[in-house]
Amino acid sequence: MGSTVLTGIGTLVTNDPDLGAGPLGIIRDAAIVFDEGVVAWVGLSSAAPSADRGHDLGGRAVLPGFVESHSHLVFAGDRAEEFGARMSGTPYAAGGIRNTIAATRAATDDELRANTRRLMNESLRGGSTTVEIKTGYGQSVESELRSAKIAAEFTDEVTLLAAHVPPPEYAGRADDYVRMVCDEMIDVCAPHAKWIDVFCERGAFDRDQAYEVLTAGMAKGLVPRVHGNQLQTGPGVALAVEVGAASVDHVTYVTAADIDALAQSSTVATLLPGADFSTRNKYPDARALIDAGVTVALGADCNPGTSYTTSLPFCIAIAVRDMHMTPEEAVWAATAGGARALRRDDIGVLRPGALADAIALAAPSYLHLAYRPGVPLIQQVWRAGVSGYTADR
């Protein structure tokens, strides 16, 4: 591959306070060297070493690639009419997932693969260089296995969300569905996944059912994650902490005890403002979580029902405007925070030895991500040191 030096960086976000100022490790008038897929050097542009190739970015900001730690990209169809009904006053309930289950089951492998590729390309154009993908719209052994295999074609971060909601054929028999998931589905699908997830929520699975699914997945080597506390206070946060989950996602309705438990744990609170925007739900109290010492990530939660966006810049803008996060906190949460939620230390940062996953903005500072909401600011994206997207091409 050879080496590449990027010079003339107006603001470089390293996310390493040892390399630069503040929690984002800011270096101004900076340069960075990529070599063989990793970051080889960072520092002042005036001190940049020579490399095989060089690019002067003309004062643009450079950040770590966004880390999307929560997405549902393997599906068919959309639920635009459901969205329209919500915007007309119909409240959100978890049951709409069953419409996507039917469409996904009816789709061909090629149709699912093409839709996943489309959304992954869209994510890349939005600056996301790592994307976790969940199953959960198949809800049969065959369909969940197919979804996991397709997801694995696009990412190493595959999550088995077998327990999304009980599928139609198990209506009123959630315990029977959980038993099938634990006895059959996890065995078959675990070799194609890294994570096990469950929707612990009204309309989905209760605490005991969720615990059974998570522990069955853990017994097969999968690492737990939890959808919890999206629609009301409940057991999701406490369960995530109890099982040592990497993250608990949504975290919209929490008690003081939930916040304290998270603050005393290694479980990341992944906030998904796109879902709250799309459902007219209240936004999570990010300020209370951060002030208590909870590690916070931001995710886009792309799915056809409640957050049909792949844009982490959009989520950053919401987090700053409506969740009272500072721009620095929101950028960190969408990069290093997402990496923490995936238990990765080689992404979400730009320091020597980390993967050379980076984005350049058509702006001099990361502040523009919240300052100019809705504007396509992602100018260029590198994955493992290779340019994968340039806005003017």
Image (tube, rainbow, N blue to C red):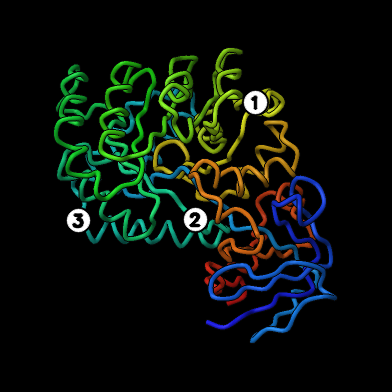
**Above or below 137: residue 344:** below
- Mark 3 residue element: loop
Q: CA distance from mark 3 to mark 2?
A: 26 Å
Find out whether the residues at labels 2 and 1 contact each other: C-beta distance under 8 Å: no
Decide if residue 122 is on the left or right side of residue 24: left
Q: Would you identify the image quadrant in which residue 376 lies?
A: bottom right
Between disc 3 and disc 2, the foreground one is: 2
Of mark 3 and mark 2, the one earlier in the sequence is 3
- Mark 2 residue element: strand
**Above or below 344: residue 33:** below
Q: Which mark is residue 108?
A: 3
Q: Residues within 10 Å of mark 1 (few under 14, many from 20)?
A: many
* Residue type indicated by callout 3: Thr
Determine which residue is flagged by label 1: 289
Q: CA distance from mark 2 to mark 1?
A: 25 Å
Decide if residue 51 is on the left or right side of residue 274: right
- Mark 1 residue element: helix
Between disc 1 and disc 3, the foreground one is: 1
Image location of residue 48, percent across then percent down: 78, 76
Q: Which mark is residue 130?
A: 2
Which residue is more in the foreground, 75 or 181?
Answer: 181
Question: Which quarter of the image is occupied by the C terminus?
Answer: bottom right
